[in-house]
Image: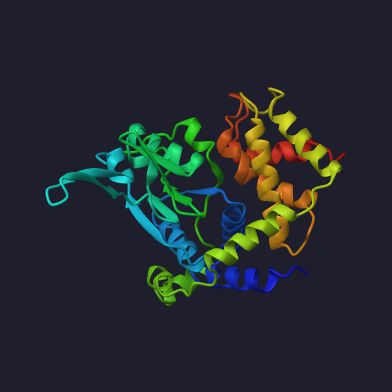
Amino acid sequence: MLVAQPKLKSLLNQLNTVIVGKSAQVQDCVACLLAGGHLLIEDVPGVGKTTLAHALARTFGLQFSRVQFTADLMPSDLSGVSVYERGREAFVFHPGPVFAQILLADEINRASPKTQSALLEAMEEKQVTVEGATRPLPTPFFVIATQNPMDQLGTFALPESQLDRFLMRISLGYPDRAAERVLLGGQDPRERANTLDSLLTPHELQQLQQQVLQIHVSDPLLDYVQDLVAATRSGRWFLQGLSPRAGIAIVRAAKAQALLSGRDYVAPDDVQAILPQTAAHRLVPVGDAGRGAVEQVRAMIDAVPLS
């Protein structure tokens, strides 16, 4: 058993007391953050997207800020502005909410494309440029974004370049009957999320991320990942295939999944478990597929043999 396992088990158990009956999705979220990636949670309103994001921020023990994205939100509302202060006789920069270790971008697809694009530099470079000056963001820096389905009123599709910056996209879905009964008869999950203990320090999180990097990936496993990436480029399943950056993201996410499973090496099961969440939001199914991107990725997994 790896040194991190007791800590990770406690972390997952705490999150599962808030998001009931969704242990697989909770594990995906934790894997995403351990891999150093940004997380997109997409689903209909009211299933716990924002609550899950709050619970993750508190459990990971990181400073966070929340921004409600709306149609009139401006890029400067995220990054901050310089204001002239008479006493100093100079412009003083007032940082915006992006200067936090975790930025909760709530309903990100309700903002205009211009504002959505303002996050690109922050997510990729961990810095923002305001009025010609480049300012580094805190370490670590994560974006946890929630969005409603595209058929909801008042939403804007995220640009492909921004979707590619999210390591994973997950959906919670409706709870099953037993889990919903627990929710109906228990404490409000939002109140529960606000009382969670911080189970990690930034230093401990960095140690866990280092453990993720040390997870072994064999040559045959890398061959399998390349076979899957090549299958996305074949034209049979998707209009365009995965980029090399997406392939790197798959390996990183699989390493984090292996760590959560208590192994110091990546198995094919790890790749198969995280591939829909890591790849589907980067892909568009061919027109006659009759399936969504997630279902198409799963069908492709069944069709690509283990070498």
Q: Position of residue 35 (x, y in %)?
A: 62, 52
Q: Is residue 296 visible?
A: no
Closer-to-camera residue (229/142): 142
Q: Is residue 280 visible?
A: yes
Left or right of 288, for residue 63: left
Q: Residue at x 74, y 35 (%)?
A: 228
Q: Residue at x 56, y 62 (%)?
A: 22
Q: Position of residue 26 (x, y in %)?
A: 57, 60
Q: Position of residue 206 (x, y in %)?
A: 60, 60
Closer-to-camera residue (176/119): 119
Which quadrant holds residue 151? top left
Which quadrant holds residue 34? bottom right
Q: Residue at x 77, y 34 (%)?
A: 226
Q: Residue at x 30, y 35 (%)?
A: 131
Which quadrant, please, contains the N terminus? bottom right
- Judge whether 195 appears above or below 151 on screen: below
- Judge whether 14 appears above or below 264 on screen: below
Left or right of 77, for residue 172: right
Closer-to-camera residue (304/287): 304
Closer-to-camera residue (2/184): 2
Left or right of 10, for residue 41: left
Which quadrant, please, contains the C terminus? top right
- Judge whether 173 appears above or below 54 on screen: above
Q: Position of residue 299 (x, y in %)?
A: 71, 38
